[in-house]
Image: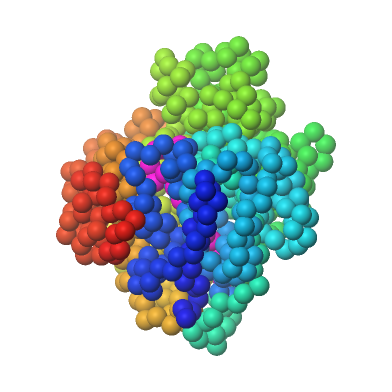
Amino acid sequence: MPNGYNGKILRVDLSSGKMAEENPPEIVYRMYMGGSALSLYYLLRELKPGTDPLSPENKLIVMSSVWSGAPLPGLSRYTVAALSPLTGAFGESEAGGFWGPELKFAGYDGIILEGCSPQPVYLWIKDGKAEFKDASGLWGKDTGDVQKQIQEELEDKRIRVMQCGPAGERKVRYACLVNGLSHVNGRTGMGGVMGSKNLRAVAVRGTGKLPLADSEKVREITKTVAELTNQSGMAQYLKKFGTSYLVNPLNQGGGLPTRNFQVGQFEGAVAISGDTMTDSILAGRRSCYACPVHCKREVKVEGKYAASPEYGGPEYETLAALGSCCGIDDLKAIAHGNELCNRWGLDTISTGVSIAFAMECTERGLLTQKDTNGIDLKFGNADGMLDMIHKIAFRQGFGDVLADGVRRAAEKIGKNALKYAMHIKGQELPLHEPRGKKGVALGYATSPTGADHLEAPHDTAFLTSSPILLSANPAGILETVTAADLGPAKVRFFAHAQQIWSFFNSLGMCVFVAAPYSAFPLPMIVDALNAVTGWNASLSELMELGERGITMARIFNLREGLSSKDDTLPERFFEPLEAGTAREKRITREEFAKALQLYYGAMGWDPRTGVPTDGRLSFLGLDWLITQKAGYGGGGEDDQSL
Ligand code: SF4
């Protein structure tokens, strides 16, 4: 009997209605651990390259990890992965809350969803039993109504519901998945994949307990991390303000994306900042499973821009996406927009950046009010932004164009609209100005999922000999590097840091609980993992897990036809910032090309093509992928090699 995990994956064929339990051997759990890497293990074996992401042939993998659900801080997260309908590349997104641990208590470590149901259904899992339930009465409804209806129908208010919203039903390419109404698998369109399968929700309830190899040690570590959290400046900031605390410092440093990334300073920043939110509309603080940090917000607004605490509150990315990026300084309107996205199942980042793109196209004369259904999409128009959220979620009028993401929208608009489409590999940029943080630029460009701000800790964390730097020492990060550097020291820092965050994605660990950002030290994470599982894992094994996950995602994308040409940035970032305190900052094409080559080399990939070498694949235990990188789609379901 394993410790920490169940040893069971549920396979669900929505077309035939058949379900089966699978029991991967322990070595599979040890090598891939969960989340991102374990999802890729299945996708690379089972998904035929070139599959239509919105067809029944795509697979939606929901994966917890070998220790999520253990009573340790930060272990709330789970991954949902598939071929992304937004990027045509590896799609993956993590969410916290309580849904992932509940799946473990219900007896499963993960779910593989395949096929397409002939009619709308939801999946109900309780204590090792799974069944389909009719969802025709849920179709089209807001997430709040659906969650309530499922809990009432099954007569248990403690049931955890993960669902796509009406946007996912309509296959919006950046539809998200929502659990607990405010925790989201936001990026890469996983909600659209769920909706395309006629699956509205997965409801879970479990009363099981996970066996722990050394429960005394687990208790001791939990207590220590709680004490360290109380002493951590970053954790206390997150507790007080949530991630919204970032608005003011980023604005002061000239790195707050404003009006579709045209400038890095917003005159309305203070009005949408964490301080203002805390003093005005904040109604409460929320947490995920077993977390001492409590970074989640609840807001309450009445009147025209009503927002209810049950849908949480805007985090930094949302404040900047629906706020500064659209030139909007009305915090209440942003809070309302955040609620609409959670009600209808839209990723707030892609939604805000898509609307900002349309606003810039409007201001440059590429779109008129006739094109946008009479909505005046000028920067700063809060009501226009909110109207567009509705149109995108329900694919109405011009919303249908934006619902496919800025890359496709720009191609439809034509002229030179692509110049204003802020995306990488088709995914809209998160709200961090890469000209001021060049490690972030490298992360954006090389992320297998398209622009992603959670590829690695951001450059600004390592400017001084702070506790953050010290806590990263065990992973090989020893020196400070300036944010503007994109030379060998930055590439070395980035490659190490990316491996840490990649193994967090496979372990289901929250980056705001763990070092280097926060209080759970890396060596203690290893001790805790061993106390849960009874293994003898080391930090170097986890770093290797991180590298394995990144490399598997690279192979996935090569199979889908992506290449080093896709590891780039929008044109705008090779030009200097025009205004603000970071004025004149830019990334030169030469420094970027050199950094990319160095990074490929550091990863054991061909420095010119970015293709992983056979030797590195073999070193990582991925020799079963050597044939796949050459375009061979094999492996197959019968292939049991590791
Ligand atoms: S720090 Fe925030 S996001 Fe992370 S587990 Fe805690 S409450 Fe959830």
Residue 60 highlighted magenta (yes or no)? no
Which quarter of the picture shows residue 362? top right
Residue drawn at x 45%, y 65% is: 22
User: Would you say the magenta stretch is mainly helix, strand or loop?
Assistant: loop
Nearest the viewer among 278 and 193 is 193
Residue 483, placed above or below residue 585: below
Instruction: Out of 395 and 115, give the one closest to the viewer.
Output: 115
Residue 251 left/right relative to 274: left
In magenta, the rendered stretch is: 73-90
Q: Residue furthest right?
A: 303
Return the x and y of residue 513 as percentages of the image width and height.
53, 66
Does 17 sit above or below residue 26?
above
Q: Residue at x 34, y 56 (%)?
A: 637
Q: In which quarter of the image is the C terminus?
A: bottom left
Instruction: Residue 76: say if magenta.
Output: yes
Q: Which residue is drawn at 58% across and 59% down?
A: 96
Q: Is residue 107 left or right of residue 588?
A: right
